[in-house]
Amino acid sequence: MQTKIMYISVNSSDFDQSEEFLQCVEDLRAGELVIFPTETVYGLGAVINKEESLKGIYVAKGRPSDNPLIVHIGEMEQIWQIVKKDPPEVFWKLADKFWPGPVTFIVKKTKNCSDIITGKRESVAVRFPSNRIAQSLIQRCGIPIAAPSANISGYPSPTRPEHLEEMRGRVKWIIETEPLEFGIESTIISLLEEKPVLLRPGPVTKEKLREIIPDLIIGQDMTEAIAPGMKYRHYSPRAKIKLIPWKGDKKEFIKNGMKMIEDLRRDQWTKKAALICTDETIEMYKETAIECISLGSRDNLYRVASHLFHVLRTLDKKGIDCALIEAFEEKGLGITIMNRLKKAASK
Ligand code: TXA
Ligand code: MG
Protein backbone atom coordinates (compact mmCIF):
# COMPACT_ATOMS: atom_id res chain seq x y z
CA MET A 1 0.00 0.00 0.00
CA GLN A 2 1.21 3.47 -0.87
CA THR A 3 1.25 5.53 2.34
CA LYS A 4 0.41 9.22 2.02
CA ILE A 5 2.26 11.50 4.38
CA MET A 6 0.99 14.86 5.58
CA TYR A 7 2.73 17.30 7.93
CA ILE A 8 0.66 19.54 10.18
CA SER A 9 2.36 22.01 12.50
CA VAL A 10 0.89 22.39 16.00
CA ASN A 11 0.72 26.11 15.28
CA SER A 12 -1.29 25.75 12.10
CA SER A 13 -4.71 27.34 12.54
CA ASP A 14 -6.53 26.17 9.40
CA PHE A 15 -5.14 22.67 8.80
CA ASP A 16 -8.63 21.20 8.98
CA GLN A 17 -9.65 23.12 5.85
CA SER A 18 -6.96 21.61 3.64
CA GLU A 19 -7.90 19.22 0.86
CA GLU A 20 -5.36 16.69 2.12
CA PHE A 21 -6.81 16.65 5.63
CA LEU A 22 -10.37 16.30 4.38
CA GLN A 23 -9.31 13.45 2.09
CA CYS A 24 -7.69 11.75 5.08
CA VAL A 25 -10.92 12.11 7.12
CA GLU A 26 -12.87 10.63 4.24
CA ASP A 27 -10.48 7.67 3.90
CA LEU A 28 -10.64 7.08 7.67
CA ARG A 29 -14.45 7.05 7.52
CA ALA A 30 -14.26 4.61 4.62
CA GLY A 31 -12.23 2.16 6.76
CA GLU A 32 -8.60 3.02 5.97
CA LEU A 33 -5.90 3.03 8.68
CA VAL A 34 -4.51 6.44 9.70
CA ILE A 35 -1.58 7.25 11.98
CA PHE A 36 -2.19 10.49 13.85
CA PRO A 37 -0.47 12.45 16.63
CA THR A 38 -1.87 12.76 20.14
CA GLU A 39 -0.36 14.57 23.14
CA THR A 40 1.07 11.21 24.35
CA VAL A 41 2.30 9.06 21.45
CA TYR A 42 1.22 8.52 17.83
CA GLY A 43 -1.87 6.32 17.44
CA LEU A 44 -2.71 3.90 14.64
CA GLY A 45 -6.41 4.41 14.14
CA ALA A 46 -9.48 2.93 12.48
CA VAL A 47 -13.20 3.72 12.85
CA ILE A 48 -14.90 1.56 15.48
CA ASN A 49 -17.76 0.49 13.22
CA LYS A 50 -15.78 -1.45 10.61
CA GLU A 51 -14.59 -4.85 11.83
CA GLU A 52 -12.24 -5.50 8.91
CA SER A 53 -10.47 -2.21 9.59
CA LEU A 54 -10.20 -3.01 13.31
CA LYS A 55 -8.62 -6.37 12.44
CA GLY A 56 -6.28 -4.47 10.14
CA ILE A 57 -4.86 -2.59 13.15
CA TYR A 58 -3.65 -5.85 14.71
CA VAL A 59 -2.13 -6.97 11.42
CA ALA A 60 -0.36 -3.64 10.78
CA LYS A 61 1.26 -3.72 14.25
CA GLY A 62 1.78 -7.46 14.57
CA ARG A 63 -0.22 -7.22 17.80
CA PRO A 64 -1.69 -10.24 19.64
CA SER A 65 -5.47 -10.21 19.16
CA ASP A 66 -6.19 -10.58 22.90
CA ASN A 67 -4.62 -7.18 23.65
CA PRO A 68 -7.53 -4.71 23.49
CA LEU A 69 -7.51 -1.21 21.97
CA ILE A 70 -8.20 2.25 23.36
CA VAL A 71 -11.12 4.10 21.75
CA HIS A 72 -10.50 7.81 21.19
CA ILE A 73 -13.27 10.39 21.10
CA GLY A 74 -13.14 13.89 19.59
CA GLU A 75 -15.98 15.36 21.63
CA MET A 76 -17.72 14.26 24.80
CA GLU A 77 -21.04 13.18 23.20
CA GLN A 78 -19.18 10.47 21.28
CA ILE A 79 -18.74 8.39 24.45
CA TRP A 80 -22.29 7.06 24.08
CA GLN A 81 -21.22 5.19 20.96
CA ILE A 82 -19.05 2.95 23.17
CA VAL A 83 -19.67 3.57 26.89
CA LYS A 84 -22.71 2.01 28.58
CA LYS A 85 -25.15 4.57 30.04
CA ASP A 86 -24.70 5.66 33.64
CA PRO A 87 -20.98 5.20 34.15
CA PRO A 88 -20.03 5.56 37.85
CA GLU A 89 -20.00 9.02 39.46
CA VAL A 90 -16.21 8.92 39.69
CA PHE A 91 -15.97 8.75 35.89
CA TRP A 92 -17.55 12.22 35.61
CA LYS A 93 -15.38 13.57 38.37
CA LEU A 94 -12.19 12.36 36.70
CA ALA A 95 -13.25 13.22 33.16
CA ASP A 96 -14.15 16.72 34.31
CA LYS A 97 -10.69 17.20 35.75
CA PHE A 98 -8.45 15.36 33.26
CA TRP A 99 -10.23 15.37 29.88
CA PRO A 100 -9.32 16.22 27.26
CA GLY A 101 -5.92 14.87 28.20
CA PRO A 102 -3.57 11.92 28.75
CA VAL A 103 -5.84 9.69 30.87
CA THR A 104 -7.70 6.55 29.73
CA PHE A 105 -10.64 5.06 31.64
CA ILE A 106 -11.80 1.45 31.58
CA VAL A 107 -15.59 1.39 31.84
CA LYS A 108 -18.49 -0.88 30.81
CA LYS A 109 -19.07 -0.96 27.07
CA THR A 110 -22.25 -0.69 25.02
CA LYS A 111 -23.62 -3.88 23.42
CA ASN A 112 -22.62 -2.87 19.90
CA CYS A 113 -19.00 -2.05 20.78
CA SER A 114 -17.03 -4.62 18.77
CA ASP A 115 -15.33 -7.61 20.44
CA ILE A 116 -12.31 -6.92 18.24
CA ILE A 117 -11.74 -3.67 20.14
CA THR A 118 -12.15 -5.17 23.58
CA GLY A 119 -10.83 -8.70 23.10
CA LYS A 120 -14.32 -9.97 24.02
CA ARG A 121 -14.37 -8.07 27.33
CA GLU A 122 -17.46 -6.37 28.73
CA SER A 123 -15.32 -3.29 29.32
CA VAL A 124 -13.77 -0.73 26.99
CA ALA A 125 -10.85 1.69 27.31
CA VAL A 126 -11.76 5.25 26.34
CA ARG A 127 -9.75 8.47 26.00
CA PHE A 128 -10.44 12.04 24.89
CA PRO A 129 -7.09 13.38 23.64
CA SER A 130 -6.23 17.07 23.96
CA ASN A 131 -4.09 17.26 20.82
CA ARG A 132 -5.89 19.55 18.33
CA ILE A 133 -5.07 17.44 15.30
CA ALA A 134 -6.42 14.28 16.94
CA GLN A 135 -9.54 16.09 18.15
CA SER A 136 -10.29 17.61 14.78
CA LEU A 137 -9.69 14.33 12.94
CA ILE A 138 -12.10 12.40 15.19
CA GLN A 139 -14.71 15.19 15.30
CA ARG A 140 -14.80 15.48 11.54
CA CYS A 141 -14.86 11.72 11.18
CA GLY A 142 -17.94 11.66 13.42
CA ILE A 143 -17.11 8.15 14.65
CA PRO A 144 -14.78 7.30 17.57
CA ILE A 145 -11.40 5.92 16.55
CA ALA A 146 -9.82 2.77 18.02
CA ALA A 147 -6.07 3.27 18.19
CA PRO A 148 -3.15 1.56 19.88
CA SER A 149 0.28 3.19 19.86
CA ALA A 150 1.59 3.24 16.27
CA ASN A 151 4.68 1.07 16.81
CA ILE A 152 5.42 -2.47 15.71
CA SER A 153 4.29 -4.59 18.68
CA GLY A 154 6.93 -4.72 21.43
CA TYR A 155 8.97 -1.75 20.19
CA PRO A 156 8.96 1.68 21.93
CA SER A 157 5.98 3.88 21.06
CA PRO A 158 6.58 6.52 18.34
CA THR A 159 6.89 10.15 19.40
CA ARG A 160 8.52 11.70 16.31
CA PRO A 161 7.92 11.42 12.55
CA GLU A 162 11.16 9.49 11.98
CA HIS A 163 9.85 6.75 14.32
CA LEU A 164 7.01 6.12 11.88
CA GLU A 165 9.18 5.05 8.99
CA GLU A 166 8.66 1.38 9.91
CA MET A 167 4.90 1.83 9.41
CA ARG A 168 5.14 3.06 5.83
CA GLY A 169 3.33 0.75 3.47
CA ARG A 170 1.15 -0.56 6.33
CA VAL A 171 -1.36 2.33 6.58
CA LYS A 172 -3.10 4.73 4.18
CA TRP A 173 -2.09 7.98 5.91
CA ILE A 174 0.52 9.23 8.34
CA ILE A 175 -0.07 12.67 9.88
CA GLU A 176 3.22 14.02 11.19
CA THR A 177 3.82 16.91 13.57
CA GLU A 178 6.40 18.36 15.99
CA PRO A 179 7.59 16.24 18.97
CA LEU A 180 4.60 15.38 21.14
CA GLU A 181 3.78 17.14 24.39
CA PHE A 182 4.18 14.17 26.79
CA GLY A 183 5.86 11.53 24.63
CA ILE A 184 4.75 8.71 26.94
CA GLU A 185 1.48 6.74 26.94
CA SER A 186 -1.61 7.79 28.87
CA THR A 187 -2.37 6.89 32.47
CA ILE A 188 -4.91 4.03 32.52
CA ILE A 189 -7.49 3.77 35.34
CA SER A 190 -10.04 1.00 35.68
CA LEU A 191 -13.43 2.13 37.01
CA LEU A 192 -14.99 -1.33 36.97
CA GLU A 193 -14.62 -2.08 40.68
CA GLU A 194 -15.83 -0.16 43.71
CA LYS A 195 -12.51 1.66 43.96
CA PRO A 196 -10.58 3.03 40.96
CA VAL A 197 -7.46 1.02 40.06
CA LEU A 198 -4.37 2.43 38.38
CA LEU A 199 -3.43 -0.05 35.64
CA ARG A 200 -0.72 1.87 33.81
CA PRO A 201 1.18 4.87 35.22
CA GLY A 202 1.36 7.76 32.77
CA PRO A 203 1.72 11.55 32.50
CA VAL A 204 -0.92 12.12 35.20
CA THR A 205 0.71 10.76 38.35
CA LYS A 206 -0.87 8.77 41.19
CA GLU A 207 -0.21 11.75 43.49
CA LYS A 208 -2.29 14.02 41.19
CA LEU A 209 -5.02 11.40 40.92
CA ARG A 210 -5.22 10.94 44.70
CA GLU A 211 -6.00 14.64 45.10
CA ILE A 212 -9.32 13.80 43.39
CA ILE A 213 -9.71 10.13 44.33
CA PRO A 214 -7.88 9.43 47.62
CA ASP A 215 -9.03 5.78 47.50
CA LEU A 216 -7.17 5.02 44.25
CA ILE A 217 -5.68 1.51 44.31
CA ILE A 218 -2.37 0.85 42.61
CA GLY A 219 -2.57 -2.23 40.33
CA GLN A 220 -0.36 -4.74 42.11
CA ASP A 221 1.63 -6.21 39.32
CA MET A 222 1.03 -4.36 36.12
CA THR A 223 2.58 -7.19 34.17
CA GLU A 224 -0.47 -9.29 35.04
CA ALA A 225 -3.77 -9.74 33.37
CA ILE A 226 -5.79 -6.66 34.32
CA ALA A 227 -4.38 -4.38 31.61
CA PRO A 228 -3.70 -7.29 29.32
CA GLY A 229 -1.21 -5.35 27.22
CA MET A 230 1.13 -4.91 30.15
CA LYS A 231 2.01 -8.60 30.18
CA TYR A 232 3.61 -8.46 26.76
CA ARG A 233 7.15 -7.50 25.92
CA HIS A 234 7.16 -3.72 25.64
CA TYR A 235 9.21 -0.67 24.92
CA SER A 236 12.26 -2.78 24.11
CA PRO A 237 14.90 -1.69 21.67
CA ARG A 238 17.07 -4.41 20.11
CA ALA A 239 19.93 -3.31 22.39
CA LYS A 240 20.19 -5.11 25.73
CA ILE A 241 19.29 -2.75 28.60
CA LYS A 242 20.54 -2.85 32.17
CA LEU A 243 19.47 -0.37 34.85
CA ILE A 244 21.83 1.35 37.27
CA PRO A 245 19.72 1.18 40.46
CA TRP A 246 18.71 4.53 41.94
CA LYS A 247 20.42 5.46 45.20
CA GLY A 248 19.45 8.57 47.16
CA ASP A 249 23.11 9.42 47.61
CA LYS A 250 24.58 10.84 44.39
CA LYS A 251 28.16 9.81 45.15
CA GLU A 252 27.15 6.20 45.83
CA PHE A 253 25.00 6.23 42.70
CA ILE A 254 27.87 7.38 40.46
CA LYS A 255 30.34 5.00 42.12
CA ASN A 256 28.02 2.09 41.41
CA GLY A 257 27.50 3.37 37.85
CA MET A 258 31.27 3.45 37.28
CA LYS A 259 31.56 -0.10 38.59
CA MET A 260 28.79 -1.30 36.28
CA ILE A 261 30.54 0.33 33.32
CA GLU A 262 33.74 -1.51 34.25
CA ASP A 263 31.85 -4.83 34.54
CA LEU A 264 30.17 -4.22 31.20
CA ARG A 265 33.53 -3.49 29.58
CA ARG A 266 35.00 -6.69 30.98
CA ASP A 267 32.10 -8.99 30.13
CA GLN A 268 30.95 -7.48 26.85
CA TRP A 269 34.15 -5.99 25.54
CA THR A 270 33.49 -7.04 21.97
CA LYS A 271 30.15 -5.26 21.97
CA LYS A 272 29.24 -1.65 21.29
CA ALA A 273 28.08 -0.14 24.57
CA ALA A 274 26.46 3.12 25.68
CA LEU A 275 25.36 4.83 28.85
CA ILE A 276 22.10 6.72 29.19
CA CYS A 277 22.35 9.21 32.00
CA THR A 278 21.17 12.68 33.01
CA ASP A 279 22.46 16.26 32.78
CA GLU A 280 23.52 16.04 36.42
CA THR A 281 25.87 13.09 35.86
CA ILE A 282 27.03 13.17 32.23
CA GLU A 283 30.25 15.09 32.92
CA MET A 284 31.35 12.61 35.58
CA TYR A 285 31.05 9.66 33.25
CA LYS A 286 32.93 11.31 30.40
CA GLU A 287 36.30 10.04 31.63
CA THR A 288 35.12 6.45 31.15
CA ALA A 289 35.15 7.08 27.38
CA ILE A 290 31.88 5.18 27.00
CA GLU A 291 29.33 6.86 24.73
CA CYS A 292 27.00 8.90 26.97
CA ILE A 293 23.52 10.15 26.07
CA SER A 294 21.59 12.38 28.49
CA LEU A 295 17.84 12.08 28.96
CA GLY A 296 17.77 15.63 30.36
CA SER A 297 17.75 16.98 33.90
CA ARG A 298 16.32 15.15 36.90
CA ASP A 299 14.71 18.48 37.77
CA ASN A 300 12.45 18.19 34.73
CA LEU A 301 11.06 14.66 34.60
CA TYR A 302 8.46 15.69 32.01
CA ARG A 303 11.28 16.35 29.61
CA VAL A 304 12.97 13.06 30.54
CA ALA A 305 9.71 11.18 29.89
CA SER A 306 9.14 12.87 26.54
CA HIS A 307 12.68 12.05 25.47
CA LEU A 308 12.78 8.45 26.65
CA PHE A 309 11.41 6.51 23.67
CA HIS A 310 13.42 8.60 21.25
CA VAL A 311 16.62 7.75 23.13
CA LEU A 312 15.73 4.03 23.27
CA ARG A 313 15.23 4.06 19.50
CA THR A 314 18.47 6.00 19.02
CA LEU A 315 20.40 3.08 20.56
CA ASP A 316 19.33 0.84 17.70
CA LYS A 317 19.97 3.55 15.11
CA LYS A 318 23.54 3.76 16.38
CA GLY A 319 23.96 -0.02 16.39
CA ILE A 320 24.50 -0.17 20.17
CA ASP A 321 24.46 -3.75 21.54
CA CYS A 322 24.10 -3.04 25.24
CA ALA A 323 23.26 0.06 27.25
CA LEU A 324 23.30 0.97 30.91
CA ILE A 325 20.52 3.34 31.93
CA GLU A 326 20.39 5.38 35.12
CA ALA A 327 17.28 4.59 37.14
CA PHE A 328 14.99 7.23 38.71
CA GLU A 329 13.46 7.59 42.12
CA GLU A 330 10.01 5.98 42.08
CA LYS A 331 7.80 8.90 42.98
CA GLY A 332 5.69 11.23 40.85
CA LEU A 333 6.52 10.93 37.18
CA GLY A 334 9.55 8.82 38.20
CA ILE A 335 7.10 5.91 38.64
CA THR A 336 5.95 6.24 35.03
CA ILE A 337 9.50 6.49 33.68
CA MET A 338 10.64 3.49 35.74
CA ASN A 339 7.63 1.44 34.60
CA ARG A 340 8.76 1.83 30.98
CA LEU A 341 12.47 1.40 31.77
CA LYS A 342 11.91 -1.82 33.72
CA LYS A 343 9.94 -3.23 30.81
CA ALA A 344 12.66 -2.20 28.35
CA ALA A 345 15.21 -3.97 30.57
CA SER A 346 13.21 -7.19 31.03
CA LYS A 347 13.67 -9.37 28.01
O1 TXA B 1 -1.47 7.33 25.23
C1 TXA B 1 -2.04 6.29 24.87
O2 TXA B 1 -2.78 5.63 25.62
C2 TXA B 1 -1.79 5.84 23.42
C3 TXA B 1 -2.40 6.88 22.48
C4 TXA B 1 -2.37 6.46 21.04
O3 TXA B 1 -3.72 7.17 22.91
N1 TXA B 1 -2.35 4.55 23.19
C5 TXA B 1 -1.82 3.41 23.71
O4 TXA B 1 -2.48 2.26 23.32
O5 TXA B 1 -0.86 3.40 24.45
P1 TXA B 1 -1.88 0.78 23.51
O6 TXA B 1 -2.79 -0.09 22.75
O7 TXA B 1 -0.46 0.77 23.16
O8 TXA B 1 -2.09 0.50 25.03
C6 TXA B 1 -3.40 0.31 25.53
C7 TXA B 1 -3.40 -0.48 26.81
C8 TXA B 1 -2.98 -1.91 26.62
O9 TXA B 1 -2.09 -2.29 27.66
C9 TXA B 1 -4.31 -2.66 26.74
O10 TXA B 1 -4.13 -3.95 27.20
C10 TXA B 1 -5.08 -1.78 27.71
O11 TXA B 1 -4.74 -0.48 27.31
N2 TXA B 1 -6.54 -1.96 27.56
C11 TXA B 1 -7.30 -1.67 26.49
N3 TXA B 1 -8.59 -2.02 26.70
C12 TXA B 1 -8.67 -2.54 27.94
C13 TXA B 1 -9.70 -3.09 28.74
N4 TXA B 1 -10.96 -3.19 28.30
N5 TXA B 1 -9.37 -3.54 29.98
C14 TXA B 1 -8.12 -3.44 30.44
N6 TXA B 1 -7.09 -2.93 29.73
C15 TXA B 1 -7.34 -2.49 28.50
MG1 MG C 1 1.43 0.32 22.92
Image (cartoon, rainbow, N blue to C red):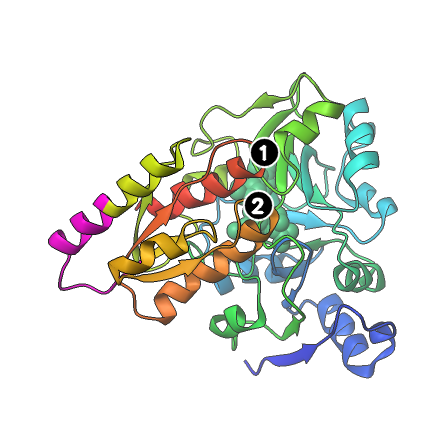
Local secondary structure at mark 2: helix
Residue 182 visible in this rendered orientation of the protein: yes
Query: Who's the residue at 72% across and 73% down the image?
Result: 27
Q: Quadrant of the N terminus?
A: bottom right
Q: CA distance from mark 1 to mark 2?
A: 9 Å
**273 within the magenta span:** yes
Q: Identity of the amino acid at label 2?
A: Leu
- The residue segment tinted magenta is 259-274
Between residue 69 and residue 255, name the one nearer to us: 255
Query: Who's the residue at 42% across and 66% down the image?
Result: 314
Between residue 183 and residue 5, name the one nearer to us: 183
Q: Is residue 324 left or right of residue 55?
A: left
- Asked if the residue at tag 2 contacts the one at tag 1, i.e. Cβ–Cβ closer than 8 Å, the answer is yes
Relative to 246, does residue 297 appear above or below in the rendering?
A: below
Q: Quadrant of residue 239?
A: bottom left
Between residue 139 and residue 315, name the one nearer to us: 315
**Disc 1 residue lies near ligand 1 with CB under 8 A:** no
Q: Is residue 8 left or right of residue 252?
A: right
Q: Identity of the amino acid at label 1?
A: Gly
**286 within the magenta span:** no
The residue wearing badge 1 is 332
Q: Quadrant of residue 282?
A: bottom left
Residue 197 x %, y %: 61, 25
Residue 113 x %, y %: 70, 44
The residue wearing badge 2 is 301
